[in-house]
Amino acid sequence: MKPAAGAFLGGAASRLLPASIPFRFFGSAVVFQGLAWLALMAGADGLPRFVGGLGWPLAGLHLITLGVLVMSAIGASLQLLPVATRQPVRSTFLPLAIWWLYTPGVAAVAAGMGLGMPALLAAGAVAVLLALLMVAALLARNLLGARGMTAVVAHGWAALACLGVVLTTALSMALAYVGAAGEIGVPLLDRTSALPWHLAFAGYGFMGLLALGLSYILVPMFALSAAPDERQALHSLGLAIAALLLAAAAALDAGAALGSGVPWLRLLACALGLAAVALHLVLMFRSLRSGMRRELGGSFILVRFAWACLPASLLAAAAITLGSRWPALPTLFGLLLIGGWLLGFLLGILQRILPFLASMHVARGSKRPPTPGSLTDERALAVHRLCHFAALAGLALAIVAESGALAALAAGIGAVGAAAFARFYFKLRRRMAAAAPRADGARELA
């Protein structure tokens, strides 16, 4: 009999960071989500056929990727990995330093993109780069001392390797923008290679592998099921890594010498990616079916939707590779990958993990700790889910119809949803503070 996925929670309270550290990352992600939708609204005219270039659509995209996805991933990994790998929290200084460097860096990157100010973009990129190098050092130190959870740890190492590629390509493109303005520097990589590497290793590599790895902890824990088969999880990871390596080789035209008119390396990468996703989803649905908790609430509507968007994005990538002439397809691919898969999965998981973490923090020193459900504003979350789905559908329609007005309306609906999610978050924090033991506990939650 495999151990329950939540078995690692034994003694978890001793491995918790002060609540103010992870929750400042989550709070920043909540704020950046609202700003992202506002940036997309400001750049709505160029959104339906957006494929790159400075402007508010690019700023909105990076407010989602850096401001929401990576910000949340930092907060979650700083808190969950020490718990999952049974490691003590050694220091709070470095996580705080990361937040103070990373948050203004993301703001500067987005402002530089939206306002067309390459120097501001480059300055923000340097701050983000330094902060993420610090994150990588913290995670590497934690993974080096990990005990158990082989598949989760392997996903962590693979995600860190992908992060190195993401940082190199991001810095290269940031310097390219500055160089194009005649101010400084030469790009590290040609943009035609850097951009596909950045997209693949950020969306499917760093963030994707982190999401898949943490799923092996979180999904069975929420479903109260046994831990997934580690060998099959490692097989899924191997297929994903092979797909990323093939995609990287394809970006360098490694298959050009074969003289084939079909970019077979990209197609093979998509096929291996689909195989990796299929195996991962088999493990996830097996956990859901075997779990003692069958009703997981509205949050898993978002998670299941995200799971559907992940293979759909790979199919869209394959269609683009085969030379589809549908002009909307590249932008729809980005919507499936970023808005459907990554953002949908993250928001669905946050709806469950935030009350869970809040309850764990309040439980320390409390005779009657609140349940996660008592800390959750379900009405706000229902409004958020409705708006999120409506916003994505509206953006898809705007892309197909090439309508800036529809894109603006969809982004406005997304902003309303982000406001509802912010209500959930800040109400959670108020309830958390009210339920906390007085004195030391109350100061920790401040």
Image: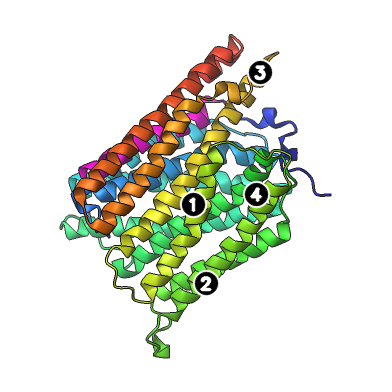
Q: Residue at position x 44%, y 56% from top?
A: 203
Amino acid marked by disc 4: Tyr
Amino acid marked by disc 3: Pro
From the image, tell me which residue sits under label 2: 271
As for residue 310 lying within the magenta part, the answer is no
x then y, percent, for residue 50: 25, 57
Mark 4 vs 2, N-terminal side: 4
x then y, percent, for residue 302: 50, 44
Mark yes or no: residue 52 visible. Answer: no
| SS for dot 4 | helix
The number of discs equals: 4
As for residue 41 lying within the magenta part, the answer is yes
> Dots 4 and 3: beta carbons under 8 Å?
no
x then y, percent, for residue 272: 55, 70
Amino acid marked by disc 1: Met
In-image side of 335 versus 289 (left or right): left
Badge 2: few (under 14), some or many (20 or more) residues near its Cα, within 10 Å? Answer: some
Task: Quote the CA–CA distance across marks 4 and 2.
Answer: 23 Å
Badge 4: few (under 14), some or many (20 or more) residues near its Cα, within 10 Å? Answer: many
The span shown in magenta is: 17-43
Mark 3 vs 2, N-terminal side: 2
From the image, tell me which residue sits under label 3: 369
Q: Which mark is residue 216?
A: 4
x then y, percent, for residue 90: 62, 34
Q: Residue at position x 44%, y 40% from top?
A: 71
What secondary structure do most residues of the magenta stretch adopt?
helix
